[in-house]
Amino acid sequence: MNDSTVSLPWLVIRQDDNGNRYRVGRYATRAEAQKIADSLDSRGHKQIYWVEHIGQGQTQTQGRSQGQAQAQAQNGEGTRN
């Protein structure tokens, strides 16, 4: 298998305290991406990290880090059903 055939559909995204978003990395599995996001989030900075999946031409959010959940709670945002 060469690099051109490797599928890396899981992204770790970082959002800083100014709202700027950056792709941190791409990963083969959700578990791998979530491990990286959790590790980065545990450093205690103001940045928020979460995992997204790229699929069928659109990006779908698959999870969020603890920091993102805390930031949303502080801003009065939450999960709506």
Image: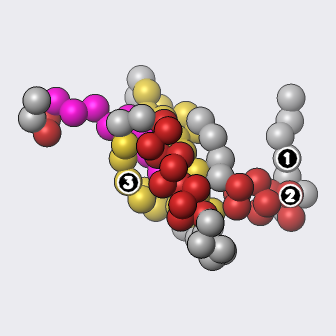
Looking at this view, name the residue that lies furthest to the right.
76
34 up-or-down from 46: above or below? above
In this image, 68 relative to 14: left or right?
right
Measure how far apart labels 1 and 3 are at the Cα level: 26 Å
Q: Amino acid at mark 2?
A: Ala
Along the polypeptide, which appears first: circle 1 or circle 2? 2
On the image, which quarter does residue 63 sit in?
Answer: top right
Disc 3 designates what residue? Answer: 25
> Residue 32, image x and y in percent?
44, 43
Q: Are marks 1 and 2 in contact (CB under 8 Å)?
A: yes
Q: Nearer the viewer, residue 57 or 10?
A: 10
Question: What element does badge 1 sit on?
Answer: loop
> Which is in the foreground here, disc 1 or disc 3?
3
Q: CA distance from mark 2 to mark 3?
A: 26 Å
Which residue is located at x 36 percent, y 47 percent?
A: 26
Q: Quadrant of the C terminus?
A: top right
| Residue 5 in sight here | yes
What residue sits 59% from the left and 72% below the top? 43
Q: Which residues are magenta?
A: 5-12
Q: Pointer 2: what residue?
A: 73
Q: What residue would you read off at disc 1? A: 78
Residue 40 in percent (x, y) is at 53, 64
Answer left or right for 3 relative to 43.
left
Locate residue 63 relative to residue 30 in the image: left or right. right
* Circle 1 residues within 10 Å: few <14, some 14–19, many ≥20: few
Mark 3 residue type: Gly
**Dots 2 and 3: beta carbons under 8 Å?**
no
Helix, strand or loop at mark 2: helix
